[in-house]
Image (cartoon, rainbow, N blue to C red):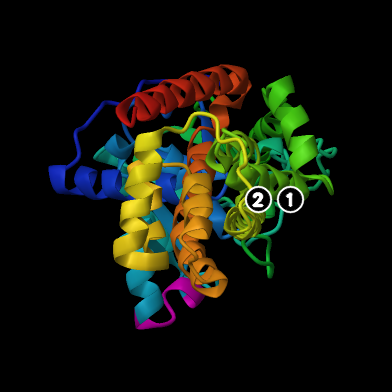
Amino acid sequence: MRTLLSTPVRVVLPRRSRVAAAFRRGLWWGVLSLTGGVERRGRLPRGGCVVVANHSSHADTAALLAALDARHSPAIGAAADYWFASPWRRRICRRLAAGFPVRRGGGGMEDLLTMAGELRAGRAVVLFPEGTRGGLAGHPADPALTGETPPEAKDGSLGTFHRGALVLAEEAGVPVVPVGIAGTDRLLPKHGRLRSSLVRVTIGEPLPSAVTPEEARDAVVALHARTVAEPLKDSATRRRVAAVVTSRWGVPLAFCWAFAEALSWPLMPELLLGVVCVAVPRAAPKMSLGALAGSLAGGLLALQLASAGVHLPAPLTTDRMRAEVRHELAVEGASAVRHQPWNGIPFKVYGAEAGRADVPALDWLTASATARGSRTLTVGLAFAGFGLLLRRHRRQYGRYLALLGGGFAAGLSLIVHGWG
């Protein structure tokens, strides 16, 4: 491996450029966090550099903008015949990706050399030397999103590297930095649809500007292979929870839990959603809908039983709770259940008291669907978003469960004491 003859001088870029780069980094980090997360290994050297990376998806640009330091104000070389072919694409490319046009049908070298001054000023110029999407495939399937055992990564081949990136680096006197990207081919496949996937970006050691295309290509291939092969750290408890959630028993479990809570069970279904939606964020919609269906079915049965004179056990409830619900039902009828998501009184108290107040079943079902639906679906999706944001810490899932259980117990104690 050749060594650098000199260390690049650090030059501070204009504040406006760095602020815009910070905005783009935050934007794409947020987007990728919601679609599976992004991880970075390594850092760019100080000063300007030419970044060369494998290219298998349009999501590669977002991954690099999210991973590279804003102080380098990275600029992305984009195909002029595609990204600059219309005004709206040009605006999107320049504003959201700091893109600059590179012609693929002749004149591309001239386009690249216009960035030499930017490099000398300390900027990072990102190029995909293959010239088009393709190249390496293979991705670590994220069990935090899929609930499945990761499959073996697929092998692929990286296309031939064009010399343009290396000529630009030599002209500007800056190093070439190889970068391996994994997971974007799953996140946004070529001609495919967007889906959840962890994205990993590994930044390698800088290479001298006189590096050959073959050496740069080999460095990117090695980084990609290392990125794909790195095992995902996970919690055995989370994997067991995920196995149940993604099995045929997942939705019935949510239904039965919520059904029982609407009758007598003291633990609200939102606690279950806090467990399962963080473990498997993609399962949040179906688990939330299952819990909602169970709540409505249980609440309707509680109303019918109470109207028939049946008194079911209601642990962790108080006479003051029941008195407050009776007052609300007398004033507002079935619509009184709209207070339930906010006042801490269990849903089963509303169901039982609605039955004793002879609230019509259809009115009760309609009102409770709105009240419970807004709460259950919002909580489920919120826990799913939390699970996505904390995906890289999923090995701490056991500790999360302990904190969730402790927080729930403390909150329930405060509610019961407050209504005592």
| Residue farthest along the bottom direction in this orientation | 86
Assign the N terminus to one quadrant of the image: top right
Residue stretch rendered in magenta on the structure: 81-87
Relative to 284, is 328 on the left or the right? left
The amino acid type of the residue labelled 1 equals: Val
Classed neighbour count for the residue bearing mark 1: other residues with Cα under 10 Å, few (<14), some (14–19), many (≥20): many
Considering only vertical position in the picture, is 415 above or below 28?
above
Using the image as rendered, state which of residue 277 and residue 192 is in the foreground: 277
For image coordinates 50% across by 67% down, the residue present is 364
Using the image as rendered, state which of residue 106 and residue 187 is in the foreground: 187
Secondary structure category for the residue under label 1: helix
Relative to 138, is 193 on the left or the right? left
> Answer yes or no: do the residues labelled 2 and 1 have beta carbons within 8 Å?
yes
For image coordinates 72% across by 34% down, the residue present is 228
Give the alpha-carbon distance from disc 2 to disc 1, as whole Å.
Answer: 5 Å
Relative to 114, is 380 on the left or the right? right
Question: Picture coordinates of residue 268 (x, y %)?
Answer: 55, 39
Question: Picture coordinates of residue 238 (x, y %)?
Answer: 69, 28
Considering only vertical position in the picture, is 361 above or below 162?
below
The amino acid type of the residue labelled 2 equals: Met
Where is residue 19, by image quadrant? top left
Question: Picture coordinates of residue 262 (x, y %)?
Answer: 59, 47
Could you tell me if residue 41 is visible in this image? yes
Q: Residue at label 2?
A: 287
Give residue 251's mark. 1
Using the image as rendered, state which of residue 50 and residue 338 is in the foreground: 338
Instruction: Judge whether residue 398 is colored magenta.
Output: no
For image coordinates 73% across by 41% down, the residue present is 141
